Image (cartoon, rainbow, N blue to C red):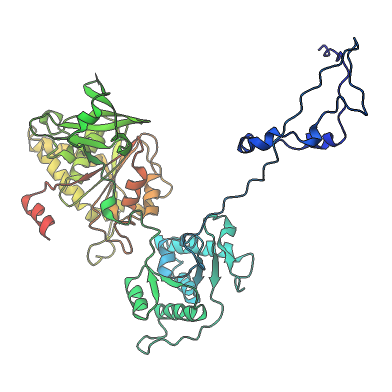
Amino acid sequence: MPLPKPPATRAAILPTTAYDTQAAPKTRRAAAKAAPAQAEEPHPALELRTESADLPAARGSGGLPVKAPSRAKAAPAAPAPQPKVRKPRGSGPAKLFVLDTNVLMHDPMSIFRFDEHDIYLPMITLEELDGHKKGMSEVARNVRQVSRELDALASEGGPDSQEGVPLAKTGHKEAGGKLFFQTTFLDVSLPAGLPQGKADNQILGVVQSLREQHPKREVVLVSKDINMRVKARALGLAAEDYFNDKTLEDGDLLYTGVLQLPADFWERHGKTMESWSQAGYTYYRITGPLVPALMVNQFVYLEAPGEAPLYARVTEITGKTAVLKTLRDYASAKNAVWGVTARNREQNFALNLLMDPEVDFITLTGTAGTGKTLMTLAAALSQVMEDRRYSEVIVTRVTVPVGEDIGFLPGNEEEKMSPWMGALDDNLEVLARSDTSAGEWGRAATNDLVRSKIKIKSLNFMRGRTFMNKFVLIDEAQNLTPKQMKTLITRAGPGTKIVCLGNLAQIDTPYLTEGSSGLTYVVDRFKGWPHSGHVTLARGERSRLADFASDVL
């Protein structure tokens, strides 16, 4: 590799102070732009001495003076970036939250959900946790996880100190408070009507004692037990429910998956609209003020008197434009799914989702009699038996009884689950009657074949499984917790479709509400994903008696 040519002239001599300045790190462009006035002033240490009284000017080989290099310009050093510190939501000292045992059993990570506020755990809470740690139930697993979290927090730095244990030391940076354990006996005077030996009353005594010890600090009891909160407020103590597990504060804010277009939709969005036809469907590319409110796989409709109605689904959103795709009319008998046709607008939307192979996760909510199970089972049998898209149908549900438990059931897994699958049997009977062309022998043979393609599984044995090329139907999903819902959905392998059905007005699991149900959780988290869809079925189609009972009872 040849060497570069040697310089033709002598270089100007730099002062010794310029060496350290040139070795300093360069400032950022943003800092230089922020202070243009200072950047224009040359630094005295960077002035190149070319012509001065003490040093002769540099000359070239011909004796002519060489043009001095321009003065260097440098911006002042930018200050080091400071880490962002989250501002507390309120002013004054941090609150002190006393957690009831049922909060930890419900959400094992609840101790890290209180932002900058402190957590206080009474000793009776730890005793109750110790009594529920054995077993294979969801509560026992949560208790064991809480014990592991508390052990990690208390392992390095005495929990009996008055300073408390920082909650962020195990990696949960969102928790800015401290954890305090009760290490001393608190002498509390509760009303004589409250038995001192009961655990709830001991926790109430701890809250009252803490309020007396910290008069300038707000002490709040957090409990999922309504009666516990009522007793605390009757004693003049602050008590709150645990709200962090709630996806939505109000059930009316839940995503419905359906949007009615305004009457002036075409006037406001039709000027720049593009339309084309492909594979029997019509597509519309629109741009307008309604686009930011749309989501992928959301259904839109426009019904105006004297005009053809529009029923479409949002298939693509790119910037300020959205693409609408018309639907297949499943209300027509020629598009019947296993003999089932849509009886209303929302059922037509649901069948379009159920029959779409590109949609992997579907949630259907609605009151009793809206056809959730019947449509899903018909779509499953059609795609398993006729289209051969899936190998079999797997049906499961939560075994939460409405009344008294009937005890242990005999038989294998499927036989034990059969009493809980009465809805499946009823819908299979309806689907079998829809086949009027075959005789009684033909229907009996079809029923046997259908039964061989439907597997009934229990939720207790779902961990570690992987469903490949299956149609999974989760009935009564409103009784699932978010953690259980995550366990089920993550079982899906390649080519599997999961459909969750439920009525949020019929929750039987303790401590679950419409806002904290696992069904609400997945509807809110999956909305807008290109391979998921949700429809809230509004009108019942079971019978006029069932529809009237749903409205007036």
Residue 178: x percent and y percent? Answer: 55, 66
Q: Residue at x 89, y 16 (%)?
A: 59
Residue 92: x percent and y percent? Answer: 50, 67
Q: Residue at x 43, y 71 (%)?
A: 220
Q: Nearer the viewer, residue 73 or 263?
A: 73
Residue 348: x percent and y percent? Answer: 18, 36
Residue situated furthest front in the rendering? 53
> Relative to 195, is 373 on the left or the right?
left
Corner quadrant of residue 417? bottom left
- Answer above or below: position of 474 versus 201: above
Q: Nearer the viewer, residue 505 or 220?
A: 220
Residue 520: x percent and y percent? Answer: 31, 51
Residue 134 visible to the viewer? yes
Corner quadrant of residue 128? bottom left
State which quarter of the image contains the N terminus: top right
Q: Nearer the viewer, residue 521 or 254?
A: 254
Residue 137 visible to the viewer? no
